[in-house]
Amino acid sequence: MSSQVLSRRGFLRVFGVGIGMTVLAACGGAASQSGASTAAAPGQQPTSVAAATPAGQSAAATTAAPVAETQTPPAASAGKTVLRVQANPDEEKPTEDLFIQQHPDVAFDNLSITGIDHEEVASKILSMVAAGQPIDLGYAATEATQLYAGQGLSLALDDYVKRDADTLKEYFADVHPSLVEAMMYEGSLYQLPFDFNAANMYYNTKVFAEAGFKHPADDWSKDDFYNIAKTLTKKDSSGQATAFGYGWINRLWGSWMPWIFVNGSNLLTEERAPGGAWLWDTFYKDDPAAKGRGGGWRWRKPKANDPANVEALDFMVQLYNEGITPAVELGGGGTLQGFFSSGKLAMTPAGGFWSGGLHNAGMKRGDFDVQLFPKWKNQRHQFGTASLFIFKQSPHKDLAWEYYKVRISKEGMKVHGVFNPVTLTTPTRRSMMTAERFAETGPEHWQVFYDTLDKHPDTAPIPAPPVSNAETTLFTSYTAKAMALEMKPQEALDALQKELEALFARNPKMYPAE
Amino acid sequence: MGRAVATYVWAYSQKEQGVSTLSTARERLERRKTGTTWLAKLREPTLKGIARREALTGYLFVAPTLLGILVFSAGPVIASLGLSFFSWNVFSPAQLVGFANYQRLFGDTRVLISFANTLRLVLALVLLELLCALLLAMALEGTRPAWLRYFFRTAFFFPLLMSGAAAAIAWSYMLHKEFGVVNYYLGLLWIPKIPWLASARWALPAIVIVYIWRQAGFYMVLFMGGLSNMPQEVLDAARVDGATGWRRLWHIVLPLLSPTVFFAAIIGVIGALQLFDEPYIMTRGGPGDATRTAVMTMYEAAFKNLELGYGSAIALLLFVLILVVTLTQFWAGERFVFYQ
């Protein structure tokens, strides 16, 4: 072979071979990097919500763009068991540290997954699992509880709960049974509720005071509400509204769903699944609020165009036509929060999550307050609840359960970042609902949050069957059409009914135990 | 294969020693007829062998790209085609359903509306963004001093560098009917508030405005490049012959610019057919289905509703649409594009 210097052409040839070999080697290697990179949590954008946002909460603050996600690397995981948890790392850390004190051989890998709303987060989790990246503990609000359970992704906790019944007695005594029932599916318990939000009515106290309105009575009516909303709507000389009496966001929780409920109806038919006696008899034997409860909810058929629903949507359209309600947006509610905090919106349905959210938006204690939702045919509220669930495919189920117990324990919940330093959602533990918790943020009538469950035991979760993702898309689509005045409410709900029937027909086995 | 490699190595060594393999090859070709040994034949470079060596080098260079296309583009397209004949939600075994997904697709009003929206968007976006870009390019081309031209070129290009999602969120605020800054300034001109994102009539135009605001800068730069590369002698000759203003633009500039316009149109159409970010973030396809695009429908079917077979069928339909549109463009290009 020549000892001459490699020619240009020769170099290029060798370079090409090298590139080809490198590519082949890279493709052949198994790069099973864990998890989507996930970004931490909360920011204040209208169309993003962190995965760990509480049930019902729309726009937790997100500084990340909706699809940006980062991952916290497992710290010092050599020789340790790593638990992969779908959670906001900052919020989850205090509870994880508590657990590590008892289990120093455990490390955590937190995945904070953002999305415009809960169904989007659920879609991302499902995609991750489908791509072969399971996690140990996922997070699900009511919107996704039956979605995961129905797909066989989440683990039924019955055996664990029965085994540790003595330890958990204190927990169940502290949590309203309606929240527990919402996390059951076909007789089994899949999650132990951690936080919840019922759609109560928030109002701007300054706007109220300027118009001479006091705190509404507990049983204030729809007409009382309407009069107040109309009075508080301000218009300029051209007739354009400059401040609105009432506003809402187009989504499944909240939106005009509370009006469906207080009008004595629902989007879907409701019934209780059989079973669950093992839980009620063990933990709620003497609790009258647990009487008649079963093995979870079944939402088997749509009734979108029920006359009561049409009436409710008619009312919403009327408020819009009269300028009392602004144009309805989709998504998170950050915009609404901005308008509310700047005095341009007097009332809106929201839960305990708004107490911290409004505080973070700059509102002081006393600037806002909350009351039960107005009464129409009844005063039945809708709520959502949320918690972690254990993935069936988790290789660390027992360990995951141990962490679960710490997380829902009194100590675990007290130190959790979602309740400290401000309350970003309503804790499911009644004992945590104290004046001290809301002392800094308000609202003054914080008791309303849990009174919703205690005083109105017929309060129920939003209708979220295993096909809730598709259901939400259809619901928000036709709501938007009606609110944009492109379809009359009856027309829109007739069309929605038709599409929901087709959706349910394509998924006949949502409740396999029947 | 081994013979080719061996030939290549031998020829390379010959070349490094200054031996012309080509002339040797010709001579060897002649000698082959007299029956040289198979080993000698193996070592002998031939004209065919040289061409093969050159081809091999070329293939090695394009191999990474080809591999990427096979693995990340062609492979998934073929898999998607197969998946479209199944019903599969990832967690349960896939079930063969034949053409049921396609049957459902052509009866699904939402899908048909989304494709109609997509075609409307393509028409509006491509025409308007090319027009805006051309006007901007022509305006900037004659701008003096040069630093002002550079400043505006950067300013118009800047939106393209932003995150599409961030821009869409910002625009959502600005286009809010009640409190958005756009309606505020329109109000100063006594124009009533426009329900940009809350009305089916205005939602699509709002998406078009936002998209053009982001993309026009890119095409402007393309056209500026095209304009600056025009043969000056042709333009001078046209001026001497009295072609000015509109006639110069229509009969001289545009034909000379047609290759750039053609390229921009192809890119623009493909991008518009795949529009997702802005409608998803700003309106989620609403109000109703007013801004629902084909890609959104595909995404919802596959990843929200976990109907991957159905989503694949929608994807295939989109693929066919893009193919038809692109072929139509190339057909039109043969007739209307002028290459110097």
Image (cartoon, helix red, strand yellow):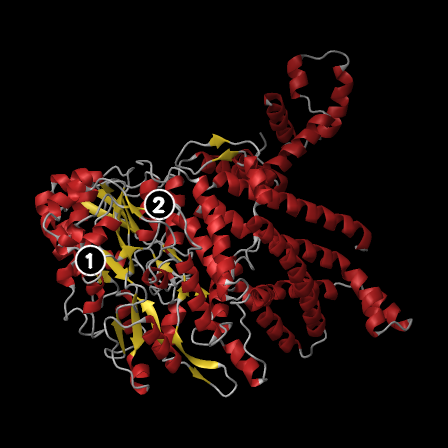
Q: Which residue is mark 1?
A: A428
Give the total of numbered labels: 2
Q: Secondary structure at mark 2?
A: helix
Q: Quick one: label 2 or label 1, which is nearer the N terminus?
A: 2
Lateral position of residue A75 relative to residue A228, left or right: left
Circle 2 chain: A
Where does the image place residue B96, in percent across and percent down from the top left?
50, 30
Lateral position of residue A395 relative to residue B273, left or right: left
The answer to which of A7 and A119 lies nearer the viewer is A119
Mark seen at residue A147: 2
- On screen, residue B47 above or below A321: above
> In this orientation, does residue A493 appear?
yes
Question: Distance of mark 2 from mark 1, alpha carbons?
Answer: 22 Å
Q: Amino acid at mark 1?
A: Thr
The furthest residue to the left: A166
Where does the image place residue B7, in percent across and percent down from the top left?
63, 24
- On screen, residue A270 above or below A209: above
At horizontal 33% and vertical 86% (from top left) the residue drawn is A211
Q: Amino acid at mark 2?
A: Leu
The furthest residue to the right: B241
Quarter holding the C terminus of chain A is top left
Q: Residues within 10 Å of mark 1 (few under 14, many from 20)?
A: many
Where does the image place residue B314, in percent across and percent down from the top left?
56, 44
Q: Residues within 10 Å of mark 2 (few under 14, many from 20)?
A: many
Lateral position of residue A254 relative to residue B138, left or right: left
Quarter holding the N terminus of chain A is top right
Mark seen at residue B192: none
